[in-house]
């Protein structure tokens, strides 16, 4: 995470299964995650990960979830945390 912040663009398609709710799990201490749009049918959302100055230097595995009804899709990312 260069400069303590990374923006990850996501393309979402529900394929007529309704609204997709996005979430992220596995944030290490001192790292926050936010989506530009956390709930959408289709389109773009950006996941922003921000490491505070108190975040430890480490590698972390983060899982992004897209949930629509009983359908769940995941993406797993490995990031190297460098505090801001």
Image: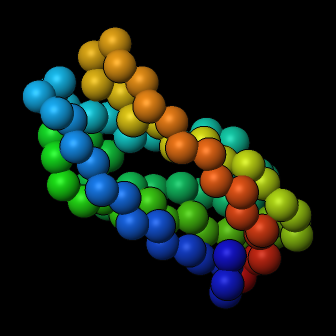
Say which quarter of the image contains residue 50: bottom right
Q: Residue at x 32, y 35 (%)?
A: 21
Residue 70, x across and y down, in percent: 34, 13
Asked if residue 40 shows in the view, the reply is no
User: What residue is drawn where x is 60% and y is 57%?
Assistant: 32
In this view of the protein, which residue sits in the foreground, 53 or 19?
Answer: 19
> Residue 73 location, x and y as percent?
44, 31
User: Percent from the top left, x then y, of residue 17?
Assistant: 17, 24
Q: Is residue 69 above or below residue 61?
A: above
- The extreme bottom residue here reads 3
Depicted 24 relative to depicted 31: above or below: above
Image-based side of 19 in relation to 53, left or right: left
Q: Quadrant of the N terminus?
A: bottom right
On the question of residue 44 being in view, the answer is yes
Residue 67 placement, left or right of 24: left
Residue 14 image offset from top left, x and y in percent: 21, 35
């Amino acid at each position: 995470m260069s400069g303590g912040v990374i923006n990850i663009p996501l393309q979402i398609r529900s394929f007529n299964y309704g609204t997709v709710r996005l979430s992220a799990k596995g944030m290490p201490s001192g790292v926050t995650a936010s989506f530009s749009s956390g709930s959408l049918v289709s389109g773009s959302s950006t996941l922003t990960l921000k490491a505070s100055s108190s975040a430890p230097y480490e590698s972390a595995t983060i899982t992004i979830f897209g949930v629509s009804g009983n359908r769940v899709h995941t993406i797993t990312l490995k990031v190297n945390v460098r505090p801001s």
